Image: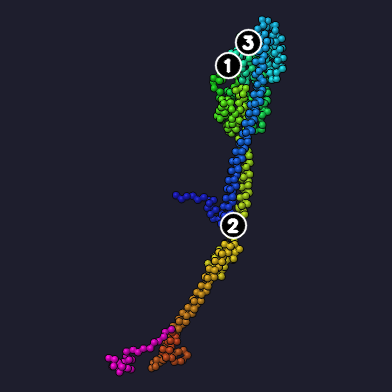
Amino acid sequence: MKARKNPLAAWFATQSVSLKLSSAFAAVLLLGVLGMGIYSSKRVRHQANQEELTTLAQLSERLAGQLDTYLSTTRSLARHLALTRDVAGFLTSPSRGARAEAFNAWLARQAGQTQGACAIFVLGRDGTCLAGSQRAFVGHNFAFRPYFQEAMAGKASASDWTIGTVTLAPRLFSAAPVQAGSRIIGVLVTEYDVAELEHTVHTFAQPGCSVLLVNRLGIILAHSETSRTYHAIEPLPRPVLDDLDRNRQFLGRSFPVDPLSPEFPAAIRQTLEDGAPRLARYRLAKLTKWGAFSPVKGQPWVAVVATPEMDILGPTRAVWVDTLTVGAITSTAAFLLALGLVRLLLQPLRALASAITAFGQGDSRSRAPIQTHRELDVLARTFNAMADTLQDHQENLEGLVHQRTQDLEQAIADMKRLEGMIPICGYCKQIRDDGGSWWQLEQYIQDHTEAQFSHGICPQCRERHFPRKNASES
């Protein structure tokens, strides 16, 4: 089975030497430019990665720091107020109803003097709200809330991001037990708005950059893209969903799962486990992104700042565009320059080839022009010397051939003169020529042929003319 020939290779094989050499020169130069482009691209890519990822990490850590600073202001007020005589006196007073109006006003003043505080309220041992800076809270039972349960166990606590059952808005709660001696008689709760946290998250958002806050369950609490708030980074297990329903943390809200690759949830878990910031590459749907993950110290949250990888590699693409542009321009210029140079170099060779062709076709006077190029000059002189020698030999050979031809023609003519009827004397044997002169037989043959005679004597003549000599010898 015959191998199929490449049409391009077949076409290229039929082209001139100048085109082949020019194309080869341009291709080599283009490969060199592309090689430098690849090297530069890798360097730029590495540098861009390092710079952009460093920036992401710094933004993420700054965001986590600001969130923690705000959270630190929400923790101390509940513990402080739980230790005051006003709160303990209200809970232990037998005339609590009569004191409720004044105590509510006192709580309202405390909330008004605290930045970010939305409400302060006091819960009885059964979780019922007995007093509050907002009257709407009074009478509601919050025993299902984890912060109440922990406070009744004697531990001050801060809640996760929670949607209030009264306000129906996201809040942060801090709770501290109120004690009379060693006995816990109630719980004081402070409620803070999360608008400051949401504002901080949106402040850190930049064009092409996503900022989000994720809790330990994998629920997005705040996002620079508001539509993705309360989404889950992976499907929540059934026990987690049941627990959320029991404590009514999100009031039965559903959590759509974002199409994130496994690297994102893994980075969240590792950041919460070791408390150290990290970088991770992941995919959101078909978009590849880099994210910087930093833990928020005051809560089991992770602040994430992410950007698409294509934005990080933007300088790399610019380098590639520049490389291809420069490569195309330089290779085209190199091709044209090489084509001109090759044609200039091949012109003397073409002249030499023309001279050789003419000489081979019989023009013995054809000579190669002497060139200014040293190597071609030597080649031309060598050919010319060879042509001169061949021409001399040819001329000598032609002279010899001409002479031999004349000699042969003369011999043939002489031989022709001995043909036919030759008049000869019947007695003396002399021969008459065309002019009527008589010649001795020997002389006539020598003059009309190349034959020469040597004289001897035959036995008969010797017997007849020298009989005595023959007798004495016998």
Q: Residues within 10 Å of mark 3 (few under 14, many from 20)?
A: some
In-front residue for pair 267/205: 267
The residue indicated by pointer 2 is 342
Relative height, residue 345 to residue 330 (above, below): below
Residue depicted at 65% across the width and 28% down the height: 62
Residue 358 position within the rendered picture, expressed as x and y whole percent measured from the top left: 55, 67
Amino acid, disc 3 = Gln
Distance from Cα at disc 2 to Cα at disc 3: 101 Å
Circle nearer the N terminus (1, 3): 3
The residue indicated by pointer 3 is 179
Number of dots carrying numbers: 3
Residue 374 position within the rendered picture, expressed as x and y whole percent measured from the top left: 58, 62
Amino acid, disc 2 = Val
Residue depicted at 61% across the width and 20% down the height: 160
Determine the image quadrant of residue 456: bottom left
Residue 222 position within the rendered picture, expressed as x and y whole percent measured from the top left: 64, 25
Q: In which quadrant will I find the C terminus?
A: bottom left
Determine the image quadrant of residue 100: top right
Say if residue 253 shows up in the picture. yes
Q: Are marks 1 and 2 in contact (CB under 8 Å)?
A: no
The residue indicated by pointer 1 is 246
In-front residue for pair 365/153: 153
Determine the image quadrant of residue 14: bottom right
Q: Are marks 1 and 3 in contact (CB under 8 Å)?
A: no
Q: Which residue appears farthest toward the bottom when viewing the image?
A: 468
Q: Residues within 10 Å of mark 1 (few under 14, many from 20)?
A: some
Amino acid, disc 1 = Arg
- Read off the magenta span: 450-474
